[in-house]
Amino acid sequence: MSSIYYIYAYLRKDGTPYYIGKGKEDRAWKHKKKDVTHPPKDKSKIIIMEGNLTEIGAFALERRYIRWWGRKDKKTGILRNRTDGGEGGTGHLGNKNPIPQSVKNKISLSKTGTKLTREHKNNVSQGLKEYFKTNENKRKKKVKTPVGIFNSNKEASEYYKTKSLGHWMRKYPNDFYYL
């Protein structure tokens, strides 16, 4: 297994990150035009946080750092990341193996006019309602702390007699984090 990946961050002037990413080679310094977040002009504001990683390890750390700093679009933090990280693949096919237009047309035709029946929509809706009714705890974030796992941030905060564990999570990320 090759260890050629790294985790990088783009920093604001105040030193806080605004983007966390996984990369290899020159990914941290060269983004595509279609990318939402671009590297800072001041290249000293690009830092490599972790290096010599496998792809799986890099994906896991990317998710953890994004969860730790939180996302602006979800109102959980300061990052501009548009995903929770850890998804996707490495690189892209570009024009090396484009899908032929004839295949695209066939896919498009196969989807045209496809409509879900009312019964199917009702079954999906009912299934989702049942799932969330019977799996309440899956929607709550569990918190790992040095003394154990708590079912919610509120429960852990009450144990530690504090309003929020956010400060501790940032200061001691290996000891306090969401599961």
Image: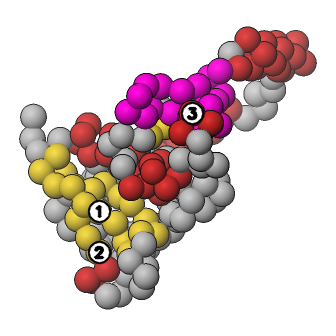
Q: Is residue 133 magenta?
A: no
Q: Please state which amino acid type lies under the numbered disc 2.
A: Ile
> CB of mark 2 within 8 Å of CB of mark 1?
yes
Q: Where does the image place residue 151, in percent across and percent down from the top left?
A: 58, 25
Q: Please state which amino acid type lies under the numbered disc 1.
A: Tyr
CA distance separating discs 2 and 1: 7 Å
Q: What residue do we see at 12% from left, 51% from top?
A: 52
Q: What residue do we see at 31% from left, 80% from top?
A: 45
Question: Viewer-proximal residue, 115 or 62?
Answer: 62
User: Which circle, 3 or 2, is nearer the viewer?
Assistant: 3
Point out the image quarter for the N terminus. top left
Magenta span of residues: 137-157
Q: Residues within 10 Å of mark 2 (few under 14, many from 20)?
A: many
Q: Which residue is mark 3?
A: 159
Q: What residue do we see at 54% from left, 39% from top?
A: 160
Q: What kind of element bears circle 2? A: strand
Q: Which residue is mark 2?
A: 46
Q: Which residue is mark 1?
A: 8
Q: Residues within 10 Å of mark 1 (few under 14, many from 20)?
A: many
- Within the image, what quadrant is residue 118 found in? top right
| Residue 166, label in figure | none
